[in-house]
Every structure is written in structure tokens, then in C-alpha cells.
């Protein structure tokens, strides 16, 4: 049986105290719902002597309407998002597709946005990783996905990220030297070993969503072989700003490629009617992405699947409009 190693858990009662503790213990890790952190401690993918639990912080959970749009506290459980009438439908859909019902009751939005990158070679037992001689992300000096690669291309596999990027979400961060805002699209960088651009001691406090124009549509599509529990192996959010019956602007946000989402602007489709031909073109655009062998399943199939899911997303928006 895999056990969590002995460690201390600190439970601050204010956000400032949490940020101070995190900067005083640079090796510490934040614990929210623990649905990813606790398994990672068991398999030794995360090694830390200290966890800083954020679940008792004031305003940890909750969804509120604001003058500018919506504010979602980082600790809001995904199950609450999935059934909230306040959140945009695409976000509720994405949250409702994470893992299974039990996990969604504990898993938080903040934990999902800060989820570690995943790779078929590293999300394994310690024995499996040792037998490979490790890799750049796990006590080794080579990458098994990109021969000769010098940085890690493990995949960003969090379901809510593509939708929230498409919705132009902004983050409220709290750090030892105060609070700051950051566009969600700026949170991720290209190295799967440390893919979050959080500064030392910084925590995610809440997510802000601007109010959507009535003519904006966002749809999320996820593909995984087992629908009951799996992480996405293909994921995308399609945003179309419409000037019915034509498209005015839009973007396609693709997950599970590398450590950050890929954003494909659709501005060049402006003025075109939203019909099957346009859906095919959006599909082909998605098919220009190159999935890597960083997660299970054949890359060529996942590329084809991306094309299919993007086309279906466009047709879904056409039906809704
Ligand atoms: C069987 C199984 C299936 C899963 N399937 C999916 C899936 O389909 N899709 C998916 O997206 N995820 C999936 N997950 C992963 C996980 O359950 C979710 O991503 C969940 O949202 C993580 O949230 P959490 O609150 O449990 O995070 P935790 O496990 O507590 O933390 C995750 C990471 O976020 C950091 N963190 C948490 N909160 C903050 C904060 N406020 N500020 C800064 N850093 C923070 C932690 O330090 C840690 O690195 C699955 C997990 C399991 C065990
Ligand atoms: S992408 Fe390469 S370095 Fe990163 S976890 Fe996978 S095998 Fe390791």
C-alpha cells in the first residue's frame, strides 16, 4: 500500500498569513481539496515536508455576481460550479466532466487551475519511474517524449482551463508583498516541471469572469476513452463572437498538448456565416495542432479527434444560435 510520508500541515486563518507561511517555507506546497496532491505525495511525485492547507481561509468557497461579471472563490468545489445557474454553461459542463462525482465534491477550482502537468512516463508508480531511469521531471536527465529534449512537455490536463481562457478569466493572486491580478492565459509557461508563473509565496484567491455579450458563445469538448473518470486526452474550448448569422471574432483554446494551453485566434473568419463549411474549417485548424506522446493514446488518432471535436463544437454553437 502506498502511504503519505510524515509531514506537517499548517492551517493559516488569513490569506496574508498563508502567503507569509508559503514564503517562509519555500519547499511547502499548497493543499486545497487534495484530490491530486495526496495521490502525488503517495507516489513520491511530490516530496515536501510541509503542506499549507487553504481550506479554512475566509471566503475560500463561493460564487458571486459582481458589477463587472462573476467572482468565483478558488476553493469552490467543482460540483458546485457544475450545478450553478450563475456560471457560464461551458464552465459548468467542463467542471461536471472532471473525474467522477465523489472527486468533484472535494476538488476545487483553484486546484484545477494549478493542477500539475501530466505525462504517461511520470504519472506512474515509483517502481515504474525508477525502471525508466527517471526523466527531467523525476530524478533523471532525459525526456522520453521528445528525444534529446531539454525541457519537459508534460500536458496541461485540467478541464476548466481551456474554457476559462476562452472566457478571458482574470486571477486574483495573494503574495507576501500584496495582491495582484493576472490574466489566466498568462499563468502558464512552456516547462512542464514548473508550468505556473506564480511568484514565490503566491496563492490563487479567486477567479473573475467578465460579463459575456449576448452574442458570444463558448462550448467545451472533452474526449477520453473511459467516460466515468479519466483525464481528458483531447480537450478544447471554442469561443465564437457572433454577428448573426456571421462570425465577428473568436478563438479556439486547445488543452493536453503541452504544459500550456494553445490559443488559436479565429479573427480571420470574421464576416463568414456560421455553417457546416465554417465548422469544417475550424476542425481543420484544430487538426493543425500536433499532439505529443506525453499522454496515452496514439498521437495521430488524437489529432484526428481534435479535428472532430472542434467541428462538433462549431456545429453545437450553430444549433444554439
Ligand atoms: C481518479 C482521478 C481522476 C481525475 N480526473 C480529472 C479530470 O478528468 N480532469 C481534471 O481536470 N482533473 C482530474 N483529476 C485531478 C483533480 O481531481 C482535479 O484537477 C482537481 O480540480 C484538483 O483540485 P484540488 O482542490 O483537489 O487540488 P489539490 O490536489 O489540493 O491541489 C492541486 C495543485 O494545485 C495547487 N493549489 C491548489 N489550490 C491552490 C491555490 N488556491 N493557490 C495556489 N496553488 C493551489 C496545489 O499546491 C497542487 O499543486 C483527477 C484526479 C483523480 C484522482
Ligand atoms: S515530458 Fe519528458 S521530461 Fe516531462 S514528464 Fe514526460 S518524460 Fe518526463
Image (cartoon, grey):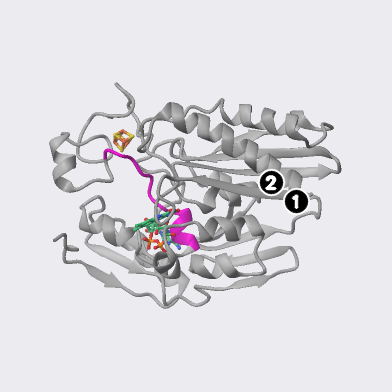
Task: Report, in whole angstroms, how far the alpha carbon at label 2 lies from the one at label 1.
Answer: 6 Å
Q: Which residues are magenta?
A: 109-121
Q: Is residue 229 magenta?
A: no
Query: Cβ(mark 2) to ligand 1 < 8 Å?
Result: no
* Label 2 close to label 1 by CB (< 8 Å): yes
Question: In the figure, is residue 80 to the left or right of 283?
Answer: left
- Dot 1, crowdedness within 10 Å: few (<14), some or many (≥20)? few
Residue on which disc 1 sits: 320
Q: Nearer the viewer, residue 310 or 154?
A: 310
Q: Nearer the viewer, residue 185 or 172?
A: 185
| Residue 138 point in image, percent of width and height | 23, 41
Extreme residue toward the top, this view = 148
Residue on which disc 2 sits: 316
| Residue 274 point in image, percent of width and height | 78, 37
Location of residue 201 with respect to 86 vertically, above or below: above
User: Mostly what secondary structure, the magenta segment?
Assistant: loop
The residue depicted at 62 percent of the width and 53 percent of the height is 169
Q: Quadrant of the N terminus?
A: bottom left
Amino acid at each position: 500500500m502506498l502511504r503519505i510520508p510524515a509531514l506537517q500541515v499548517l492551517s493559516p486563518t488569513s490569506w496574508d498569513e498563508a502567503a507569509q507561511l508559503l514564503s517562509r517555507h519555500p519547499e511547502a506546497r499548497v493543499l486545497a481539496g487534495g484530490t491530486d496532491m495526496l495521490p502525488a505525495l503517495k507516489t513520491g511525485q511530490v516530496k515536501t515536508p510541509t503542506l499549507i492547507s487553504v481550506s479554512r481561509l475566509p471566503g475560500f468557497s463561493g460564487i458571486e455576481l459582481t458589477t463587472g461579471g462573476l467572482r468565483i472563490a478558488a476553493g469552490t468545489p467543482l460540483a458546485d460550479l457544475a450545478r450553478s445557474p450563475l456560471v457560464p454553461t461551458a464552465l459548468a459542463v467542463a467542471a461536471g466532466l472532471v473525474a467522477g462525482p465523489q472527486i468533484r465534491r472535494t476538488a476545487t477550482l483553484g486546484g484545477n487551475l494549478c493542477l500539475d502537468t501530466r505525462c504517461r512516463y511520470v504519472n506512474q508508480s515509483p517502481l515504474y519511474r525508477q525502471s525508466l531511469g527517471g526523466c527531467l521531471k523525476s530524478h533523471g536527465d532525459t525526456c522520453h517524449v521528445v528525444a534529446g529534449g531539454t525541457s519537459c512537455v508534460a500536458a496541461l490536463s485540467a478541464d476548466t482551463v481551456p474554457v476559462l481562457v476562452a472566457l478571458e478569466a482574470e486571477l486574483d493572486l495573494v503574495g507576501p508583498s500584496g495582491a495582484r491580478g493576472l490574466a489566466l492565459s498568462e499563468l502558464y509557461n512552456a516547462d512542464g516541471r514548473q508550468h505556473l508563473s506564480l511568484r514565490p509565496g503566491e496563492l490563487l484567491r479567486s477567479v473573475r469572469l467578465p460579463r459575456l455579450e449576448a452574442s458570444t458563445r463558448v462550448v467545451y469538448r472533452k474526449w477520453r476513452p473511459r467516460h466515468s473518470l479519466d483525464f481528458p486526452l483531447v480537450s478544447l474550448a471554442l469561443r465564437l463572437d457572433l454577428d448573426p448569422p456571421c462570425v465577428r471574432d473568436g478563438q479556439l483554446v486547445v488543452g493536453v498538448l503541452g504544459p500550456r494551453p494553445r490559443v488559436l485566434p479565429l479573427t480571420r473568419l470574421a464576416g463568414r456565416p456560421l455553417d457546416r463549411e465554417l465548422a469544417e474549417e475550424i476542425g481543420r485548424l484544430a487538426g493543425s495542432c500536433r499532439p505529443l506522446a506525453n499522454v496515452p493514446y496514439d498521437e495521430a488518432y488524437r489529432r484526428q479527434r481534435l479535428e472532430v471535436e472542434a467541428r462538433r463544437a462549431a456545429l453545437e454553437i450553430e444549433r444554439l444560435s
